[in-house]
Image (cartoon, rainbow, N blue to C red):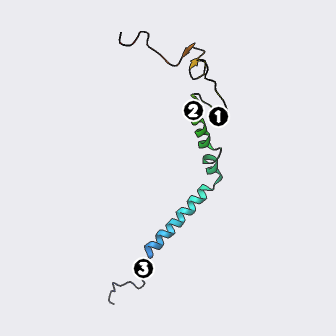
Amino acid sequence: MAKSNEYSLDQSGQSVVEYILLLVVITSLAYSLYSHPKFKQFFGRNGFFESMRIGISHTYRYGIEGFDDSNSYEYTDNKHKTYYNPEANSSRFFSPVTEYGK
């Protein structure tokens, strides 16, 4: 029997078909993961990352930890929580005892 180097079928598009099938499998796995209730509980509305985002934005905006953005702080005196510490009777800011450079 003589060996033939020619293919019996044309296989020029086989790799494209394999990549398409791989893409379909990965897409279906991603969709099933995304639609799972545990995933939505962690990443969705009122999930872990949403509450973390709200807390960080509140802390950045007002300088104190919290989640309620409806507070309206009055900055009329130095008794605000981010400036004045009533237990230590001091501010969180500091200044030198003597004038700088003397």
The answer to whether mark 1 and mark 2 are in CB contact below 8 A is yes
Which residue is found at the position 44% from the left and 77% from the top?
13
Which residue matches tag 2?
61
> Please, what secondary structure does the residue beneath circle 1 have?
loop
Marks 3/1: CA–CA distance: 63 Å
Instruction: Report crowding for label 2: few under 14, some 14 to 19, many 20 or more residues within 10 A (C-alpha).
Output: few
Q: CA distance from mark 1 to mark 2?
A: 9 Å
Helix, strand or loop status at disc 3: loop
Residue to which mark 3 is pinned: 11
Nearer to the camera, 6 or 48? 48
Q: Residue furthest bottom?
A: 1
Q: Where does residue 59 sit, x and y in percent of width and height?
A: 57, 32
Q: CA distance from mark 3 to mark 2?
A: 62 Å
Residue at the spot x=50%, y=66% of the render? 22
Q: Quadrant of residue 68?
A: top right
Q: Position of residue 49 (x, y in %)?
A: 59, 43
**Of residues 33 and 97, the one drawn nearer to the viewer in this rendering:** 97
Q: Which residue type does callout 1 highlight?
A: Asp
- Residue 67 occupies quadrant: top right
Q: Nearer the viewer, residue 71 or 44?
A: 71
Give coordinates of residue 98: x percent, y percent: 41, 9
**Disc on the earlier residue, 1 or 2:** 2
The amino acid type found where label 3 is placed reads: Gln
Q: Which mark is residue 69?
A: 1
Label 3: few (<14), some or many (≥20) within 10 Å?
few
Of discs 3 and 1, which sits in the foreground? 1
Residue lying furthest right: 70
Q: Are marks 3 and 1 in contact (CB under 8 Å)?
A: no
